[in-house]
Amino acid sequence: MAGLYLHIPFCTQKCNYCDFFSAPPTENQLENWHLLLQRNLQLIASQQTPVIETIFFGGGTPSLLSPAQISSVLSCCRKLFSFDHNVEISLEANPSSLTASCLEGYLTAGINRLSLGIQSFDDRTLQLLGRKHTADLAKQTFTLARNIGFSNISVDLIFALPGQATADLEQDVKQLLDLSPDHVGIYGLSIEAETPLEKMVKAGQISEVDEEIYAKSYLLLNRLLTDAGYEHYEISNFARPGSRCLHNQAYWQRKTCLAAGAGAHGFDARAYGKRTAITTNLKRYQQQLNARQNPAELLEEFDLRQAMGETLYLALRTSDGINRAAFNQKFGVSLEEAFPQALDHLRSHLQQKDDRYFFTVESWLLYDHLISHFL
């Protein structure tokens, strides 16, 4: 069983906070991208054909592809791979790029999970972030998608925004809960190098939120969303019962994820695991596919020690934590034998229930520091 990630690296306008790889598409690029993805998929299938249990169209802005193009890619996937009968097929989408006919087309094509990049329900904040939609449009798009038949919708929300008061965040959450999404992703704003927001910080126009406000905002979100019936199942993710994102969950469980599209990253779980990356150079990507060369290049190959460490710290991102018996069975050594000093350092943060270790929500705020003991 494996996941499949399909990258669409195009945005008509880059958001002010984004430092991810994306580019404004030419008309020709948009017309042909689904064909390049299919060539890429054919090369992947010539090497391995696991049963696919999740597919994720990410970007960029995947909703720039038409329903017909998405349908064409999924038809190609079905010809090349077997699908699990409960396959989860997600599409990231911006409210500004969706219409009723598009949503109907995506649903007919096979998309059964929609991830909406709403980010905020405040128009001034959306303008600061460089988003193209308004709060009203975001709500209308969500309601439209629900009425058309999408029963699994995720919404992204950004917090720790410059000048965001507690009341502002509470209002954002109230409007989010009024929509009743099935899944919520929360992301603390990070001022990245060479972005418009960094320039605004340097010019003194805005100030980055300090760690104390960040922590209070994070814990407030945890309280408001869990009180509303959401499970805080991963550092940045909440879900209604039965609505966890299976694709992302597979990343944290170190399952195989095939990847296609310029800028995509994949993971092969065989042996101790290896990670691959596809070039972000669009011209080179097309040339490789034209020459029938697999564009995926080895990024990292794990040895036993690295595989054990990554298995442990990725599991600690989740509320499920790490199962001690499963770890022992997989690697032939207990957690305590593999990481005696690290576990001793983290004793005040690690919780234990039955046969698993896990972090509390408060410890998740220190996650990057705490996992350094396993690196």
Image (tube, rainbow, N blue to C red):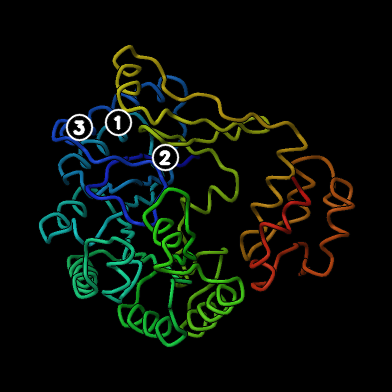
Q: Amino acid at mark 3?
A: Gln
Percent of width and height locating residue 138: 23, 69
Which residue extends farthest bottom?
167
Q: Which element type, helix, strand or loop, lies under badge 1?
A: helix
Badge 2 or badge 3: first in the primary sequence: 2
Residue at image mark 2: 4
Q: Which element type, helix, strand or loop, lies under badge 2?
A: strand
State whether residue 183 appears in this view.
no
**Circle nearer the viewer, 2 or 3:** 3
Q: Which element type, helix, strand or loop, lies under badge 3?
A: helix
Which numbered circle lies on residue 37?
Answer: 1
Q: Amino acid at mark 2?
A: Leu
Tell me what residue is drawn at x 78 percent, y 55 percent: 324
Question: What separation in Å lies between label 1 and label 2 (alpha carbons)?
Answer: 12 Å
Q: Is residue 318 left or right of residue 191?
A: right
Disc 3 residue crowd, few under 14, some 14–19, many 20+, Cα 10 Å: few
Q: Is residue 240 left or right of residue 220?
A: left
Disc 2 residue crowd, few under 14, some 14–19, many 20+, Cα 10 Å: many
Percent of width and height locating residue 202: 45, 59
**Circle nearer the viewer, 1 or 2:** 1
Percent of width and height locating residue 363: 69, 69
Question: What separation in Å lies between label 2 and label 3 (alpha carbons)?
Answer: 22 Å
Residue at image mark 3: 29
Which residue extends farthest left?
101
